[in-house]
Image (cartoon, helix red, strand yellow):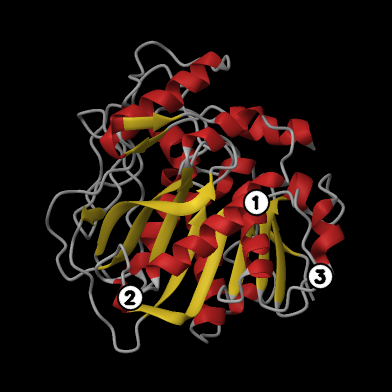
Amino acid sequence: MTQRLLTYAAGAVMTASLIAAPAATATTNGAPGADTADRSGELALPAPRGPLPIGSTAFHLVDSGRPDPWVPESGDRELMVSMFYPTYAPLGRRAPYMTAAESNAYIDAQRDSGAPIPDDIPDTILRTVHTGAVRDAPALPRPGGRPLVVLSPGFSLSRSSMTGLATDLASRGYVVATIDHAYESYGIEMPGGRLLPCEACATEDYAKIPRGRSEDVSFVLDRLLSDRSPWRYARTIDSDHIGMAGHSIGGNTAATAMSNDRRVDAGVNLDGTFFAPVRGALDRPFMLLGDERLHAPDGGDESWPRDWSKFTDARYWFSVTDGGHFTFIDFPVLREQLGMEPGPISGRRSMDLTRTYVNAFFDEHLRGRDRPVLDGPSPQWPEVNAHHE
């Protein structure tokens, strides 16, 4: 199991020899399409499918009095958070995907790990990704507020890797907070240009990661929902309806955070091993969505069947035939645009699948809207296998 996580962390997203040349396809909200890079060599996520334009803003948080678990001598725990939310001002500066320094750190780490990334792929390529969101746009209010969804990325990956899901949720009326956990990514840029490396990448205590991230999540909720919130539009959040999803170790974090913080009403694990086992009964809705090879009931990841019985409220278990660990994040789309094989499932299909099932889960359990796709096999998604009653 340890080797499997290390394989996840080392997976290269950029191994194409050339950036695709054809122009991007325009979409209904003016964002580039996601089938190819555009003429300038820039990349793009698929346009969100909801009707609402999206704003995004980022901020830095410091949890005073809690030393960083990986580098205690660095001082208090630091986080970077990006908010995605509906806006009524769809024009303006585009929200960044990564900074140039973060992209450089990620691509360098891949090359150092032996990934065959050609020299003509620039280290700053991930800086070019179009997100479809407008930077620092005003939030669109809604009577009663909007449900909040927190997203936590996979180990060694940054919060940007779940941007395609975040923007889609926001376009459908959610407020989304994506979190970068200090020293757990190949490179996180902090204010002042400080780039924090992945000190956690040397650990063999993988259970420490979701436990520490759970504290991060509670701290972010404390700050977001406080009278002195770092986000100026925090009053648009409906604090009684909060969900969380995570990829890989971030999925384990979703369950751990729910166990530790009852404000989190519903959770999703996207292909993540439960290195930190679920403690006791988890009495709120939870969904498992993963790769068929390891995350079917008889797959190789024994932590899923082990902890399945601990979900005592509405529970869902889906596995994807011919899926992969990165099926549930942005990488297949970006690989495809660089002329690479995304895997047996196309990049666009991978993202549409993830968006469909995660949106349906939160719609049903944060908004009370019936979503039949959760009930069992779906003719629209024949590659998705349902393992729940």
At x 21%, y 59%, the residue is 29
Q: Is residue 3 above or below residue 138?
A: above
Q: Mark 3 points at which residue?
A: 280
Q: Are marks 3 and 2 in contact (CB under 8 Å)?
A: no
Q: Is residue 274 left or right of residue 54?
A: right
Q: Position of residue 330 (x, y in %)?
A: 46, 44
Give 159 or 122, whichever is nearer the viewer. 159
Q: Which residue lies furthest to the top in this view?
A: 119
Q: Is residue 41 above or below residue 150?
A: above
Label 3 to label 2: alpha-carbon separation: 33 Å
Q: Do the residues labelled 1 and 2 touch (CB within 8 Å)?
A: no
Q: How crowded is mark 3: few (under 14 residues within 10 Å), some or many (20 or more)?
A: few
Q: Is residue 150 above or below residue 330?
A: below
The amino acid at mark 3 is Gly
Q: Position of residue 213 (x, y in %)?
A: 58, 52
Label 1 to label 2: alpha-carbon separation: 28 Å
Mark 1 or 2, which is nearer the eye?
A: 2
At x 65%, y 51%, the residue is 210
Label 3 to label 1: alpha-carbon separation: 16 Å
Q: Name the residue under label 1.
A: 210
The amino acid at mark 1 is Pro
User: Can the viewer see residue 72 in this picture?
Assistant: yes
Give 161 or 378, whichever is nearer the viewer. 161
At x 51%, y 36%, the residue is 183
Q: In this view, does 63 lie to the left or right of 245?
A: left
Q: Earlier in the sequence, mark 3 or mark 2?
A: 2
Q: Residue 227 carries which label?
A: 2
Q: Where is residue 312 in the image (x, y as percent from the top left)?
A: 78, 78
